[in-house]
Image (cartoon, rainbow, N blue to C red):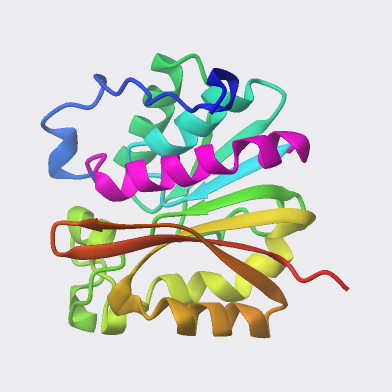
Amino acid sequence: MDNCEKIKTPLFSNITSEDLEHIYEPYEDSFLLIDALEKDLHMIRESQPSVCLEVGSGSGVVLTALASALGPRCQYRATDINPRACRVTRETGKLNGVKIETTCTDLVSAVQDELKGKVDVLLFNPPYVVTPSDEIGRGDLEHTWAGGERGREVMDRLFPCVDSLLSPQGLFYLVALKENDPDDICETMAKFGFSNTTLLARQTGPEKLCVLRFGHKQE
């Protein structure tokens, strides 16, 4: 792979031990998503994206990594339900010379109207761990990993919003766990008019993770 098609791992020395008591630490799933974006980097560049949005940005390392590779021609937006995560995302971007605008909101509720049909790259590393439903949103850290039944309760709430957010050429990148039933996720998204590709799959300890890419079905 040519060096210009690589994505560098961002610096994140801004994240403190106190931050990590409240936000998701950059981990294997974060870097798997970065690797998937690197695999698609040429295609993403060729599409000349104007708006990139990460839902549930946490530390901001994924969006910062993509932004560092694409440069300032794009608007970088992030949402998180946790105000600390929003702050850390901005700080991670700034440390790496990237400007990220953050919105503290549940998934995309506060930006959906503004960004309707404008998002060229949509990123989501969701809370995917299978847990009892009542663990969802119990605390800052639980927000980052507790996914409820099948680990799907949070991501399933975003899926109906994707079509209205994406531009005609927009792409949606999603991290999923084997227990989330990726085949069923793809069937669900197909009902909303999306084709799918499994970009990467990786075993990380006990977790079998994958990154799915969705785009509008071509007529």
- Residue 101 drawn at (x, y percent): 55, 33
Q: Name the residue furthest right.
A: 219
Rendered position, 122 above or below 159: above
- Give the total of numbered labels: 0
Examine the rendering and report whether any part of residue 27 can be seen. Answer: yes
Q: Which residues are magenta?
A: 25-49
Q: Nearer the viewer, residue 11 or 107?
A: 11
What residue appears at the point 26 percent right and 39 percent down from the top-left corner?
Answer: 26
* Image side of residue 167 versus residue 135, left or right: right
Membership of 211 in magenta stretch: no
Q: Determine which quarter of the picture holds residue 149.
A: bottom left
Rendered position, 99 above or below 163: above
What residue appears at the point 71 percent right and 58 percent down from the top-left corner?
Answer: 166
Q: Quadrant of the C terminus?
A: bottom right
* Image side of residue 154 versus residue 130, left or right: right
- Residue 129 drawn at (x, y percent): 23, 69
| Main secondary structure of the magenta stretch | helix
- Residue 130 drawn at (x, y percent): 22, 76
* Image side of residue 143 versus residue 70, left or right: left
- Residue 113 drawn at (x, y percent): 71, 58
Examine the rendering and report whether any part of residue 48 can be seen. Answer: no
Q: Determine which quarter of the picture holds residue 170.
A: bottom right
Q: Name the residue furthest front.
A: 1
* Image side of residue 37 versus residue 130, left or right: right
What residue appears at the point 57 percent right and 23 percent down from the top-left corner?
Answer: 2
